[in-house]
Every structure is written in structure tokens, then in C-alpha cells.
Amino acid sequence: MTDRVHSLTVVLEADVRDDDIQPVINAIRMIKCVIDVRPEVANITTHMAEKRARMDLQKQLWDVLNG
């Protein structure tokens, strides 16, 4: 039996100004089966998560380089 997908999440490579992202939102809306696109505003929680992930990667790299 085949699974049914109800939604997709798109992650941008960097935060984009809300007035600059509108063409991307419009393009996604043109894709078959898309009924809604809602932007998620970056906030302190997303900022902290990004910083923690970056710190973790730096630590892992440092550990590899120092053996």
C-alpha cells in the first residue's frame, strides 16, 4: 500500500525579507496540488536553534582536527 503525503516543508538557505520572498511564494502556489503557502517569520527561537547547530558543528570539526 502507498503512503499519502499531506504537506511538504520548504527550508530556505537563509532568512529572506518578507517583501523579497513573495515571488517564491507565488511560484510554489503554481505547483500542482498546492492549496496554501504560509511563510514562517524568523524569531529568537529560530535564531537560537541556528546558533546552537552551528556551535555543535564547530565543536565536531574541532574534535576531528584535534584527534
Image (spheres, rainbow, N blue to C red):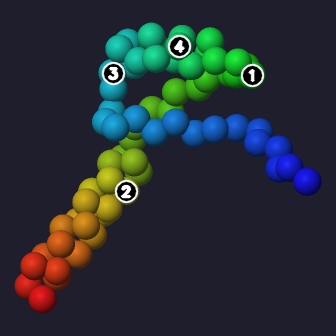
Relative vertical location of residue 29 with respect to residue 59 in this rendering, above or below: above
Q: Look at the numbered discs 2 and 4 and tell me whether their residues touch, using CB distance below 8 Å.
A: no
What residue is drawn where x is 32% and y is 62%? 53
Residue designated by label 4: 27
Q: Name the element at disc 1.
A: loop
Check disc 2 and give the amino acid type.
Ala
Left/right of residue 32 with respect to residue 49 in the rendered view: right
Q: CA distance from mark 2 to mark 3?
A: 19 Å
Q: Secondary structure at mark 3?
A: loop
Q: Is residue 51 above or below residue 12?
A: below
Which of the 4 image quarters holds residue 43?
top left
The one nearer the camera, 14 or 18, is 14
Q: Mark 2 = which residue?
A: 49
Reading the image, the residue beneath label 3 is 17
Mark 2 crowd level (few <14, some 14–19, many ≥20, 10 Å Cα): few
Between disc 2 and disc 4, whose residue precedes? 4
Mark 3 or mark 4, which is nearer the start of the sequence? 3
- Helix or strand or loop: what does disc 4 sit on? helix
Distance between the alpha carbons at the discs numbered 1 and 4: 13 Å
Residue bearing mark 1: 33
Return the residue nearer the eye: 60 or 52: 60
